[in-house]
Image (tube, grey):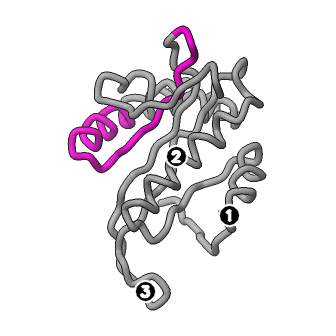
Amino acid sequence: MDAYHIRAATPADLEILVHHRQRMFEDMGRTDAAGLAAMRASAAGLLRRRLAEGTYLGWLVEAADGRVVAGGGIILLDVLPGPTFPDPRRGWVVNMYTEPEHRRRGLARQLLETMIAWSRARGMPRLFLHASPDGRPLYEQLGFAPTSEMSLNL
């Protein structure tokens, strides 16, 4: 990690955040150009608003040359509490992406450890994420467990 450093994302990083989101989906085999273009437009608007509100927090990894080579973020949400987790605050980990030539160097782990530490320091009760097959082993190593989540396309 000596050749890299982690910094907070700012509104000026919007294009990088959207790029990471697109590449993340492309790496998972989602290559429909129209769908990706629609996602980019929608994601840009949402990320712009949430960055301004402080409800999206991103972290980016810069290489020694200053180029951003990895990133991830947390969307802060309030959900209805339950008996196990009465605190309504939740963090949703999103946009985990590392440029291919920088993979297998522990960057995703460092990003997640940074996000987990940030969340713990603020008393966040829980983090959630959707795991890709490639990301699942890392998430499990860091203590993430599968949940009973289901979805319905409308």
Q: Check if mark 3's residue and mark 1's residue have beta carbons within 8 Å.
A: no
Q: Amino acid at mark 3?
A: Gly
Compared to 2, does 48 lie above or below?
below
Q: Quadrant of the N terminus?
A: top right
Residue 114 numbered tag: 2
Q: Amino acid at mark 2?
A: Thr
Disc nearer the start of the sequence (3/1):
3
In front: label 3 or label 2: 2
> How crowded is the residue under tag 2: few (<14 C-alpha within 10 Å), some, or many (20+)?
some
Q: Tell me: 111 left or right of 102.
A: left
Q: Which quarter of the figure has residue 87?
A: bottom left
Q: CA distance from mark 2 to mark 1?
A: 14 Å
Q: Position of residue 12 (x, y in %)?
A: 30, 22
Q: Which mark is residue 143?
A: 1
Camera-side mark, 3 or 1: 1
Look at mark 3 in the image and give the residue it sits on.
82
Residue sticking out furthest to the front: 2
Which region shows up in magenta? 42-65
What x and y, as percent, mark residue 139? 69, 54
16 or 105: nearer the viewer: 105
Q: Residue furthest left?
A: 53
Instruction: Judge whether 77 appears above or below 98 on screen.
Output: below
Q: Secondary structure at mark 3?
A: loop
Q: Which mark is residue 33?
A: none
Instruction: Report how far apart the C-alphas of labels 3 and 2 lie in the structure.
Output: 27 Å
Compare marks 3 and 2 and give the one earlier in the sequence.
3
Q: Residue at x 52, y 46 (%)?
A: 114
Q: Quadrant of residue 33?
A: top right
Within the magenta stretch, is there residue 136?
no
Residue 73 in percent (x, y) is at 46, 43
Give me the residue at 39% from left, 67% from top: 123
Ranked by sequence position, the earlier of labels 2 and 1 is: 2
